[in-house]
């Protein structure tokens, strides 16, 4: 946390991490990816504390923007207010994307993705597990077409059995992905896309 705060130099009190929010070690992993790769676009499944931390990272290391998908309107509004309080409106966009049916499974309304392309980093921290089994699985089939050829994807909460199954499916079904486990508090897996 001390490293992150020193690196990002926030202008207002930072939102808490842990609990529903990502853990500090996963935020650090994402900030390191942003610093190294300077992605033009970061897509975040879910919004909140992480949107602010990543917004400061984009501001600090240059050039890109974040689009966070949020399925509950009240949480989308709360995240938008938080973004405004930190003066990150030009960097972070929170889109209300209600859950809709995708192949019998609820996932964010895909019309929220229509204008997105060349994402260099995707953070999969939603939808919440209570929305259905393997709730985060659709992220790869639906977001990969919006990603850069060398994109990174981070799946949070891989200590859970559902997320472990999701990771296995992604690797089995999408041979352009390779993965590395990341020893985070709630578990994380880092995927790299390679189309060459």
Image (tube, rainbow, N blue to C red):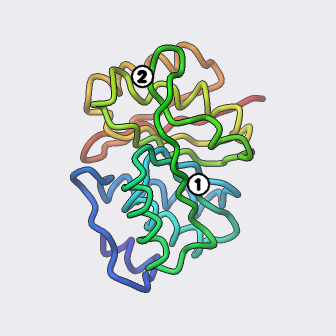
Among the 4 quarters of the image, the one containing residue 88: bottom right
Among the 4 quarters of the image, the one containing residue 93: bottom right
Furthest toward the bottom, the residue is 11
Q: Nearer the viewer, residue 106 or 7?
A: 106
- Decide if residue 16 is on the left or right side of residue 117: left
User: For the residue carrying disc 1, how many other residues have a C-alpha within 10 Å: few (<14), some (14-19), or many (20+)?
Assistant: many
Helix, strand or loop at disc 1?
Answer: strand
Residue 152 image offset from top left, x and y in percent:
58, 42
Q: Is residue 101 above or below residue 71?
A: above
Q: Nearer the viewer, residue 155 or 145?
A: 145
- Decide if residue 111 is on the left or right side of residue 73: right
Q: Is residue 90 above or below residue 107?
A: below
Helix, strand or loop at disc 2?
Answer: helix
Tell me what residue is drawn at x 52 percent, y 80 percent.
87
Which residue does the numbered mark 1 point to in the structure image?
67
In which quadrant is the N terminus drawn? bottom left
The residues tagged by marks 1 and 2 sit, at their Cα atoms, a distance apart of: 23 Å
Which residue does the numbered mark 2 point to in the structure image?
166
Residues at marks 1 and 2 touching, judged by CB atoms closer than 8 Å: no
Residue 193 image offset from top left, x and y in percent:
64, 33
- Decide if residue 3 is on the left or right side of residue 170: left
Among the 4 quarters of the image, the one containing residue 159: top left
In which quadrant is the C terminus drawn? top right
Tell me what residue is drawn at x 55 percent, y 53 percent.
95
Closer to viewer: mark 1 or mark 2 = 1
Tell which circle, 1 or 2, labels the residue nearer the N-terminal end: 1
Tell me what residue is drawn at x 44 percent, y 56 percent.
76
Residue 57 image offset from top left, x and y in percent:
53, 68
Tell me what residue is drawn at x 37 percent, y 62 percent.
49
Residue 122 image offset from top left, x and y in percent:
55, 44
Furthest toward the front, the residue is 73
């Amino acid at each position: 946390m001390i490293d992150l705060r020193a690196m990002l130099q926030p202008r207002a009190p930072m939102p808490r991490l842990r609990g529903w929010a990502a853990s500090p070690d996963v935020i650090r992993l994402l900030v390191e990816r942003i610093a190294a790769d300077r992605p033009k676009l970061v897509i975040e499944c879910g919004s909140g504390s992480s949107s602010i931390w990543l917004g400061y990272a984009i501001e600090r290391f240059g050039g890109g923007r974040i689009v966070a998908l949020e399925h509950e309107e009240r949480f989308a509004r709360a995240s938008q207010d938080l973004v405004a309080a930190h003066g990150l409106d030009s960097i972070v966009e929170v889109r209300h994307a209600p859950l809709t049916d995708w192949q019998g499974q609820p996932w964010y309304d895909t019309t929220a993705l229509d204008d997105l392309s060349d994402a260099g980093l995707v953070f999969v921290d939603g939808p919440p597990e209570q929305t259905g089994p393997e709730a985060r699985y659709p992220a790869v089939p639906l977001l990969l077409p919006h990603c850069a050829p060398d994109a990174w994807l981070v799946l949070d909460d891989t200590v859970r059995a559902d997320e472990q199954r999701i990771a296995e499916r992604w690797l089995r079904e999408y041979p352009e992905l390779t993965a590395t486990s990341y020893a985070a508090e709630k578990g994380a897996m880092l995927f790299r896309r390679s189309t060459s």
